[in-house]
């Protein structure tokens, strides 16, 4: 083999060994982690809550473009919580600038069941 062909083969073998996969490097999900603090009745909330997040085009009014996304059973301690939120890929094209968080304490299911007499 000519030295030029050998150099080309060595270079190609080296590049194929690198296994460059730009699609892997660019593939990122749309979910993100949000850390927040919740106050309830003037104090820091503690307990288990259901949280609902919605994304809007403006801080006040505007159009809802994402959600609602509900995360059930979030444990909040001294007001602090961390959740994963995923509004999907289409919402980030509208340049959202505001979002809304709604919450309610999680109420445990009644157990055991009791029989109710019919009228």
Image (tube, rainbow, N blue to C red):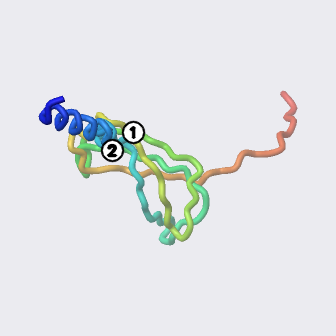
Name the residue carrying label 2.
55
Q: Is residue 83 left or right of residue 11?
A: right
Up-down: is 47 above or below 118?
below
Residue 7 image position (x, y, % from top left)? 17, 38
Residue assigned mark 1: 67
Contact between marks 2 and 1 (CB within 8 A): the answer is yes
Q: Is residue 53 left or right of residue 19?
A: right
- Secondary structure beneath label 2: strand
Left or right, residue 50 beside residue 11: right
Q: Is 116 left or right of 22, judged from the image as shown?
A: right
Residue positioned most to the left: 4
Where residue 12 sits, quadrant-wise, is top left
Q: Quadrant of the C terminus?
A: top right
Q: Residue at x 34, y 42 (%)?
A: 28
Residue drawn at 27 percent across, 41 percent down = 14
* Secondary structure found at label 1: strand
- Give the residue displayed 54% in from the left and 66% down from the top: 45
x and y, in percent, of residue 15 in the image = 25, 39
Nearer the observer, 75 or 103: 75
Q: Position of residue 29 (x, y in %)?
A: 37, 41
**Relative to 8, does residue 48 appear above or below in the rendering?**
below
First in sequence: mark 2 vs mark 1:
2
**Label 2, label 1: how far apart the Cα atoms are:** 6 Å
* Pointer 2 local density, CA inside 10 Å: few below 14, some 14–19, many at least 20: many
Q: Is residue 107 visible?
A: yes
Residue 91 in sight: no
Q: Nearer the viewer, residue 100 or 28?
A: 28
Between 24 and 12, the one lying in front of the other is 12
């Amino acid at each position: 083999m000519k030295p030029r062909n050998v150099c080309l083969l060595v270079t190609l073998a080296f590049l194929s060994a690198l296994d460059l996969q730009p699609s892997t490097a660019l593939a990122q999900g749309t979910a993100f982690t949000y850390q927040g603090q919740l106050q309830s009745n003037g104090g820091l909330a503690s307990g288990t809550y259901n949280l609902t997040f919605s994304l809007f085009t403006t801080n006040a009014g505007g159009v809802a473009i994402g959600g609602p996304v509900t995360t059930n059973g979030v444990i909040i301690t001294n007001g602090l919580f961390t959740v994963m939120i995923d509004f999907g890929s289409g919402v980030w094209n509208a340049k959202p600038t505001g979002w809304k968080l709604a919450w309610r304490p999680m109420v445990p299911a009644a157990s055991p069941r009791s029989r109710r007499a019919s009228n």
